[in-house]
Image (cartoon, rainbow, N blue to C red):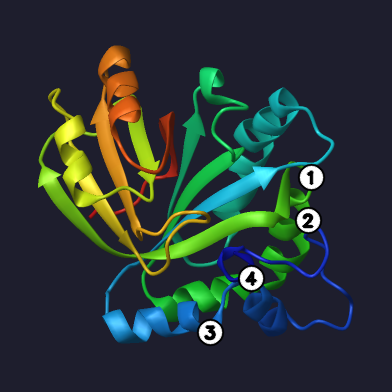
Amino acid sequence: MRDNLWRSPARGAVPADHSARRHLADCHSADDRRVGIVSRTVTQHRIYLGGPHPTLAAADAHRHWHERHSRIAPGLPRLRGYVQNRPLQEWWGVFPYTTCAESWYGSREAEVESYSSAYYRDVVVVDEARFIDRDASWTSPVTRTELVRPGPRTSRRVLAFGALPEDAAACAAPGRLELLHLHRAPPGESSPVILSFWTDDAESARAAVAGVTGTACVVRPVAIVEPAWE
């Protein structure tokens, strides 16, 4: 399990003797660093799950993420897209993570440069430690987005971490349906796939969550920096 965590030296703090590149290695494994080369993708797409802060109330953590971190993250060098997938309030305390975010870079090299920057080390990491537990968080590159059914991106999105391809049958209502193929499976799951179902209908979203495999919830996707969606 520990190999799947988005690790930091100590609650997001970077010791003075850690270089930016060393800190990047702590946050992203060697396997992650090879992904951009192996896949030869033009765009580097990554998804994150932020673990609950050990002392901060859920409402305060979500407020900080929505209102403050949304202004900080766009300052990352060479960032081309940033989306906050905000769990609806009914899922707070049910979904085991506080935050779910996606980032896009033009290349793996651009992403490495961004995470090696002083801004990431001194501003982003420090702020994250204020509202999530970085030691209980996880990240993986998205190696491929498979479009199962076309449709618009809407106000609600079901995300099922560790889903199976056959779970698409649980999303019978109209709506865009995708399978996000990951480099590594989410914590506690064996399947390296996220099912992504877009719908405006609350009941259809709840029905999809009830019918899919894995760890799922309904989120409100907010594009802070509009990405070049796959």
Q: Nearer the viewer, residue 125 or 209?
A: 209
The answer to which quarter of the image holds residue 63 is top right
Task: Kindly check if marks 1 and 3 are in contact, taking CB atoms under 8 A apart as contact.
Answer: no
Alpha carbon of mark 2 to alpha carbon of mark 3: how far? 23 Å
Q: Residue at x 52, y 60 (%)?
A: 139
Task: Kindly check if marks 2 and 1 are in contact, taking CB atoms under 8 A apart as contact.
Answer: yes
Alpha carbon of mark 2 to alpha carbon of mark 4: how far? 14 Å
Q: Nearer the viewer, mark 2 or mark 3?
A: 3
Q: Is residue 195 left or right of residue 91?
A: left
Alpha carbon of mark 3 to alpha carbon of mark 4: how far? 10 Å
**Amino acid type of the residue that numbered disc 1 sits on in the rendered structure:** Arg
Q: Position of residue 213 (x, y in %)?
A: 33, 41
- In what element is the residue under mark 2? helix
Alpha carbon of mark 1 to alpha carbon of mark 3: how far? 27 Å
- In what element is the residue under mark 4? helix
Res. 126 mark: 2
Q: Position of residue 3 (x, y in %)?
A: 59, 71
Alpha carbon of mark 4 to alpha carbon of mark 1: how far? 17 Å
Task: Kindly check if marks 3 and 4 are in contact, taking CB atoms under 8 A apart as contact.
Answer: no
Q: Nearer the viewer, mark 2 or mark 4?
A: 4
**Which residue position holds label 1?**
130
**Which residue position holds label 4?**
27
**Amino acid type of the residue that numbered disc 4 sits on in the rendered structure:** Cys
- In what element is the residue under mark 1? loop
Quadrant into which the N terminus falls: bottom right
Q: Is residue 14 left or right of residue 221?
A: right
Res. 30 mark: 3
- In the rendered structure, which disc, 1 or 3, sits on the residue that comes first in sequence? 3
**Amino acid type of the residue that numbered disc 3 sits on in the rendered structure:** Ala
**Amino acid type of the residue that numbered disc 2 sits on in the rendered structure:** Val
Q: Residue at x 36, y 61 (%)?
A: 192
Q: Nearer the viewer, residue 74 or 136?
A: 136
